[in-house]
Image (cartoon, helix red, strand yellow):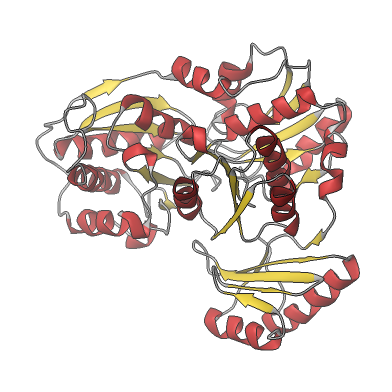
Amino acid sequence: MDPKIFKAYDIRGLYPDQLNEDAAWKIGNATASFLRSLLRGYERGLANRQSLCVGRDMRTHSTGLSDALIAGMNAAGANVIDIGMIDTPQIYFAINHLGTCGGVQVTASHNPAQYNGFKISGLEAKPVGQDTGLKEIKHIATALLHTHGVMDGAIEKYDLTEAYKQHILKFLDAKVKPLKMVIDASNGMAGKMVPLIFEDLGIEIIRLNFEHDGTFKHEPNPLVESNLAQLKATVKKRKADVGICFDGDADRLVVVDETGQTIGCDIMTALLAQYFLEKNPGAAIVYDLRSSWVVREEVLKYGGLPRRERVGHSFMKKTLRTARAIFGGELSGHFYYRDNFFADSGFITLVHLINILSRASQPMSELVKPLKRYFSSGEINFAVEDKDAMMKELSKKFSQGEADDLDGITIQFKDWWFNCRASNTEPFLRLNIEAKTKDVLDKQLAEIKAILGEPVEH
């Protein structure tokens, strides 16, 4: 087993060279051993507390990897509830709904078809990353010398579709307008779940890439602008109210307005912050530090408590819990909800968007227009050999600004700011700049490029 498949937040690699059924068995065995060891002090008497949930996405190798993962869990003495082919947020629901000690989703999210992986969650669907158990799971898994053992655990198969649908739709709180939506499922899990959850709402849904044949018509990553081309063209051609593009495992989405313009995920965070604070004045809203100034401004304007956080779902979820925040948003398209076990959900985000559009007298473009008051570079990647040295050079160059090191370096001036941070998953420095004018943005980006070099395509 290639130890490089263990990332900061999950396990991911090429199938079958880096990640195969043998590796899946060992990871399943190690995960069950680790998660069940954490149960001291919890309600051991609950029927499913010693069990784990397992789900999988639509990739051609996901079924085989899931079966091997479950066999490894059984050999560690764990009972397994197999909930079949699902979107990733459904595993968070299943863990809480069924009361298990954790669960694993077999998925490679937005990666190309030749990749696969595992997203591991613990009790109450708390994320398991490098600092919260993944390091220990890696140690146990890589020490295993074989992939066989007595199958002490049992396997049950559950279909949670109806219960999950009820959970998602309980957030629908407006009389639904007869909206027209274009939804691009990216040949991922939204292609299965959107018809099952949203088919009875009286909304016209124009489907793009709902098929599952093991291939992707475009990379299942909605953050890459070129992947939105088909969606944008269809929104304009069909005169739709809005367009939605999901990633492969349907935990993230990107929104396109009725004119075919992409709405940045931080702008969506600001819009959703208004919506939540109108109903919950004084609530905390969490946002990642790459987000526009507009997010903090809107949270304060509507009487909320802004909580700025590091990039990454483990940090966002932890802060949501500790602050009891009602909502959180990341630039990556993850949106988190207190009433969804402090976890992210693409489908709950879609429900809240339906609520907003059903109440509004304006089209989507007009709703977000007042929020587009700054100029942003978007996230730009730079391949550099010595990341620390480059960030020190940036700190020295822009030492007159107000700086912090919450995640990488953030330096703010009166008319612009930037954040530069090392990627947790790839060999890049990631840069985000925002300014009050386009001229200032262009000028400062040129100065930073003089230090970091030319960006790389990603």
- Image quarter hosting the C terminus: bottom right
Q: In this view, does 417 lie above or below 186?
A: below
Give whichever of 379, 171 is nearer the camera: 171
Residue 324 vs residue 35, the one in the foreground? 324
Residue 68 at x, y percent in the picture: 27, 37
* Residue at x-position 72% and y-position 44%: 302
Q: In which quarter of the image is residue 196?
A: top right
Residue 329 horizontal/vertical position (percent): 61, 47
Above or below for 47 versus 414: above
Residue furthest out toward the left: 150
Side of 355 where 135 appears, left or right: left
Confirm whether residue 275 shows in the render.
Answer: yes
> Which of the 4 image quarters holds residue 443?
bottom right
Q: Is residue 174 above or below residue 383?
A: above
Q: Is residue 414 positioned above or below 308 on the image? A: below
Can see residue 65? no
Q: In which quarter of the image is the N terminus?
A: bottom left
Measuring 82% from the left and 31% from the top, which residue is drawn there? 235
Image quarter of residue 431: bottom right
Report the residue at 77% width, 22% height from top: 358
Horizontal placement of 391 versus 135: left or right? right
Residue 239 at what x, y percent from top left?
Answer: 88, 26
The answer to which of 405 and 180 lies nearer the viewer is: 405
Question: Taking 395 as reference, is 439 left or right?
Answer: right
Image x and y of residue 300, in percent:
70, 51
How many numbered discs sit on the rendered protein?
Answer: 0
Front position in the image: 247 or 180: 180
